Amino acid sequence: MNVLEQSLLTVFKPNEAFLRIKERNKRFDYLSPLIVLLMFFFTRVFEIYFTHYPLASIEPRQTSVLRELVKTIIPVITWIIACYSITTISEGETLIREQFAATIYCLLPYIIITIPVVLFSHLLSANDSGLFNFLHMIKWLWMGLLIFYSTKVMNNYSVSRTILICFLSIVAAIVIWLLIGLFYILTLQVITFVDEFIKELQLLQNQ
């Protein structure tokens, strides 16, 4: 299945789209999700550089392509790991590669809505920010619903169970980031300690 076909199924027939991801397990397609992920990133860059200035949430000079790459890709990877971890211990039926593909296809609303909204923003003024923000809210809601639905369908969960799994996945994602932050702080402290220790040794040698 090519990326266009799977994308159209995700948008118009999400149930069939997510089931097909599981059915094609033995000849899994990694390239198509990666193409969608790349499109997701470029759409974010397009949004930053081409949104009408009065409505822009961030100016291009306030960020960089590398920073936006981290801000767009890392949260996606975090969710994949968190959701897969929770479903694995909760009688889930999804493999990590299936979770990877399903999560990335759930990003399609961002691509579909952002591009026309950015172009439409040039017909709006700062007074129309309410409409502009509402259009963006639609894409986030749509993405959230797709993520919820993919979790339900691909793991054969009930609605109530899916709600619980999604909540626990969010908690797991937060814990992952807290651990990363803690590791980063501890690493900085170790580096600072080693640096000061070396300086002290150098001072003692010079005396």
Image: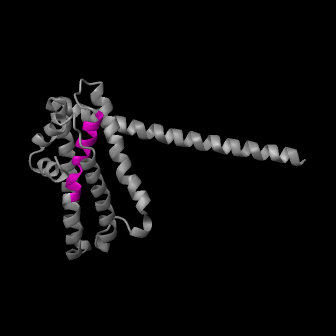
Q: Position of residue 198 (x, y in %)?
A: 75, 44
| Residue located 38% across and 68% down the image | 59
**Quadrant of residue 55 in the image?**
bottom left
Residue 112 visible? The answer is: yes
| Residue located 23% across and 39% down the image | 28
Q: Position of residue 3 (x, y in %)?
A: 19, 51
**Quadrant of residue 163 in the image?**
top left
| Residue located 43% across and 59% down the image | 66
Q: Which residues are magenta?
A: 96-111
Horizontal arrangement in the rendering, residue 68 relative to residue 144 (left or right): right
Q: Position of residue 36 (x, y in %)?
A: 25, 53
Name the foreground residue: 121 vs 3: 3
**Quadrant of residue 103 in the image?**
top left
- Is residue 196 magenta-colored? no
Horizontal arrangement in the rendering, residue 48 relative to residue 20 (left or right): right
| Residue located 33% across and 66% down the image | 48
- Is residue 107 magenta-colored? yes
Q: Position of residue 139 (x, y in %)?
A: 20, 55
Vertical side of 189 occupied by 112: above or below: below
Majority SS type along the magenta span: helix
Name the foreground residue: 105 vs 174: 105
Q: Residue furthest front?
A: 27
Vertical side of 102 occupied by 93: above or below: above
